Amino acid sequence: MPPNVMVSAPTDGNLEKFKARGCCTSHYNLSVISNCQVVFLATKPHIIPSVLKEIYPQVTAEHLIISMAAGVTLETLEKNLPLGARLSA
């Protein structure tokens, strides 16, 4: 993976495999939002609402937010992220 890929996860164990492949890593989702324009949400569906609440203040029209979580609809993203954010589910 190229060094322009950034990954966040709550534990080091989840980040080590990405670090080993040259990715930038962080324990903070807001670090990803601050440093990336295209953001993939790849977490368990029940975690998505808390992630959306956390990133909401920093999401702009510059971002493309893509959910890979099963069952998370475009409507869910639209209701929980700022108006004008580019979204895909």
Image (cartoon, rainbow, N blue to C red):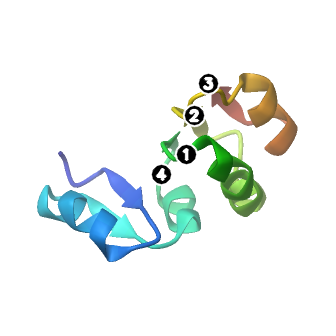
Camera-side residue of 64 and 71: 71
Q: Position of residue 19 (x, y in %)?
A: 20, 64
Looking at numbered disc 1 in the image, what kind of residue is underneath it?
A: Lys
Residue, disc 1: 44
Where residue 36 is drawn, which disc sits there? 4
Taking the image as shown, residue 62 lies to the left or right of residue 11, namely right
Tell me the mark number nearer the camera, choosing from 2 and 4. 2
- Res 82 visible: no
SS class of the residue under badge 4?
loop
Residue at 51% in and 45% down = 37
Taking the image as shown, residue 54 lies to the left or right of residue 23, namely right
Q: Where is residue 70 in the image (x, y as percent from the top left)?
A: 57, 29
Cα–Cα span, label 2 and label 4: 15 Å
Cα–Cα span, label 1 and label 4: 21 Å
Residue at 62% in and 41% down = 45
Q: Which of marks 2 and 3 is nearer the N terminus?
A: 2
Q: Earlier in the sequence, mark 2 or mark 1?
A: 1
Tell me the mark number nearer the camera, choosing from 3 and 1. 1
- Residue 78, by quadrant, is top right
Cα–Cα span, label 4 and label 3: 18 Å
Whether label 2 touches label 3, CB < 8 Å: yes
Tell me the mark number nearer the camera, choosing from 2 and 1. 1
Residue, disc 3: 89
Cα–Cα span, label 3 and label 1: 14 Å
- Res 30 visible: yes
Q: Which of marks 4 and 3 is nearer the N terminus?
A: 4
